[in-house]
Amino acid sequence: MSKSMGILAKLLISFLTLSAIPLIVLSYVANKNLNETGMLATRRAEEMGARNLAAAEQIGRTAIEDSVRELDAGSTEAVELRTLELAQRIADFLYERDKDILILASFVPDPEKYLEIFSLSRRDIILPEPQSSRPGEKQPPELTSGNPENQKSWRHRPPDDFARESLPLYREITFIDLEGQERIKIKDGKISEHRINAAGKEETYCKAEDYFGRLDHLRKGEIFVSRVIGPYVKGWLYTTDEGVKVREESAYAGRENPYGRRFEGIIRWVTPVFDGHDEKIGYVTFALDHKHLLEFTNHVVPSDKRFSELPDAGSGNYAFVWDDRDRSICHPREFFICGYDPETGEEVPGWVSEDTYAEYLASGLTLNEFVERLPSFRDFTQKKPGSTDQIKAGNIALDCRVLDTAPQCQGWHEGTEDGGSGSFLIYWSGLWKLTTYAAIPYYTGPYANSRRGFGYVTIGANVDEFHKAANSTRAEIEESIRLQGRDIEATAVQTRELIEQSSTRNRNILTLITIVSVAAIIVASVVISLGITRPLRRLSEVAVAMGRGDLNQTIEVKSKDEIGQLARSFNEMAAAVAEVDKMKSEFVTTASHELRTPIQAMLLGVSGILEGYSGKIDEEVREDLLLARDGIERLTRLVQDLLDLSRIEARKIELNLGRTSVAEIIDKAVEVVMELALFHDHTITRNVPPGIPKIVADKDRMIQVMVNLLSNSIKYTPDGGRIVIAVEAVENEVIFSVADNGYGIPLSAQEEVFKKFFQADSVMSQKVGGCGLGLAISRGIVEEQGGTIHCESPIPGGRFSGLPLGGERKGSVFIVRLPMDGSSGV
Ligand code: ADP
């Protein structure tokens, strides 16, 4: 700390360094740490949130995959089971027909009996319009269980509200004799006279029935069952932006072409009839209306809709039936059902690929012959397009063995080889489809040739449909994860905001505390410092005043601490010094007074003797007496000086102020010292310009001052010196200068010479007779009148004209400034 710095500044700096700076550092560090901890916490929370979210996403994905797999497996199982059961139901239905034919065969052939059976054999088919869509029909209220214990996962569906129509099972019932001639014929609900001979195909249905040729070996109870026979109905598909459409002129195709021409098919049952002697007399036959077979598949929907009144092959969810030769016999698009040309009785060949069709064109065979010879399931792939010629002709029946654009045909065929059931997935028409298959376990007559039985049922289902549940779970999980993510994000933002707010609050509090503390420290430092420095400053002022001689000083003491103690000690000391000084002054005054009278008497006595009042005195005595008179005179002056000094110190000097001419003061003073000056061969020059105004001063005392200054110049200047007295008036001051060309006064003594008893050159003083009081008294007199006195040495050359300087004669000048009106000092 700078040496020139005050205690107040030092204390302030110390206090601040020791308390405020650590406080600020502490507050900064605390704040920073708090902030960093907060940010770390937020970051950790965010990371944790992100990890949780990722985990939730992972769990969600796994759950979805698991549930999709489970649901797929479940759905696959359900569709497979449905296929199997459908196949079983068809088989059961067909077996029922076996019973019917055997019952018929047990009767003696009789048109009336046959007609009765014809009329009784009916079965409902579903009409394409639901009952609920009819006007006036009300939806029944939702059904629930009355027992709360059954309400968990309660599911209920009302019965279907399909409109139904009762349709005869059989198109015809006939009895033919052993030559094939129809003997009895029930057709269209009545006994028909239009009887034909079934021995040749010509008169049969579609000219395609060849059953008579297969009856010969039939024993009692044995049955022949034909394949599906019916005229092929053409169909045309075309593609639009919305997908594949069916032309109106095509066969019926369910929802896609509801008013199209129907495929009118039959399946013929035949069994021999015997008379009472077990003699075969003919055969009973009936033709099952193929519509009843269609009824099994046309309403199946392998989705949660389960059934529909109108089949919709375009939806991708449908059921088909294929016969034991893998030919389509039930299909919602009836132009796909294999049929015959009723003109020729020829089978309409199945649809083949463009490549295979080209092969046929090159073969030189008829298409029938070509297809007949074509190896089954050769190079099946959906990469091949279908033959456009066949498409154009509308001949697109599906015969799985040659339909080489549809690889699933081969899968179904292979899967039903052993009479079993199953499924596989196939990418078909832009969709992943589950396709199931199940052999129809009906093994009557020719159908006993393979384990495939009557043929097989296949059901196609859009895989997306089964994924619906899983997909909705996926959507729910994803939504919940999204919400959770949003929550985590929002919480993170909130947390960050809270931490920022709290950190700002903490920062503000810390800043406030720091500011208040620093302010308090500054105030406390100032108060404490002032408490210390004010008494010290007062002490120093008092000490300075005492130094100047003003001994009546006391310091007001309030505190009892060390500083109070110091002030008290100082007061005691000051009192003691003042007491001693007072005693000294009193002593000097008393002594001087007491000495003055005897000295005066001695001087009068010695002067009288020297004047000769006591008679004539010899020369030796005179010299002694002169020496004595000199001593007495010096003693008189000393006593006078001491008295003056004690009056000045006691501030008891009495001034006799009056308007005084400056020139008069100087003249008087020069007059007093002239003798002594002449004795030392000095020249005194007065430089008093005319027009110096009169001043208000004590004339005698000013003469005393000037005499004193002149006497010193005379005394301390080697003989033959020059003394200049100059006077000038500057503003409202008169400046007296007494200069000489003596040896000068060293700088260190220039202030000291005004102190009492100080003699710069004691040898000289001794010689010229002085006691170091003159200048002290002079200063006292001048200051008492409001003026100042000081000395300067050496004198710069040329300052006073007529004052030769140089070498050892440095010269000294005493300058007295007095206010003209004499007011300020009084
Ligand atoms: P003294 O009675 O000794 O003259 P003063 O108070 O008059 O006492 O002077 C004090 C001292 O100042 C002297 O002893 C002397 O040493 C010095 N002094 C005063 N005037 C002069 C001067 N004009 N030249 C040199 N010294 C001086």
Image (cartoon, rainbow, N blue to C red):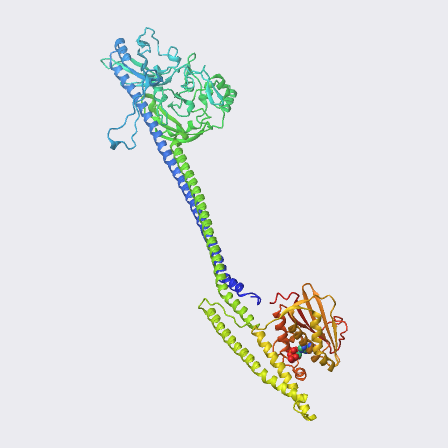
Whether residue 319 sits left or right of residue 688 in the image: it is left
Query: Is 714 drawn above or below residue 613 in the view shown?
Result: above
Please tell me in which quarter of the rendered image ligand 1 is found.
Answer: bottom right
Mark count: 0
Comparing 579 with 373, the one in front is 579
Residue 84: image x %, image y %? 33, 28
Residue drawn 55% across the image and 70% down it: 545
The one of 787 and 406 positioned closer to us in this rendering: 787
Q: Is residue 226 left or right of residue 370?
A: left
Q: Position of residue 134 (x, y in %)?
A: 34, 16
**Where residue 728 sits: x, y (%)?**
71, 67
The quarter of the displayed image where residue 783 is located? bottom right
Quadrant of the rendering where the C terminus is positioned? bottom right
Residue 362 seen anywhere in this rendered image of the structure = yes
Residue 281 visible, this orientation: no
**Residue 57 sits above or below residue 393 on the image:** below
Residue 63 image offset from top left, x and y in percent: 38, 39
Between 807 and 53, the one nearer to me in the picture: 807
Question: Quadrant where the N terminus lies?
Answer: bottom right
Q: Nearer the viewer, residue 230 or 723?
A: 723
Q: Residue at x 29, y 30 (%)?
A: 154
Q: Is residue 555 left or right of residue 178?
A: right
Does residue 618 appear left or right of residue 91 in this picture?
Answer: right
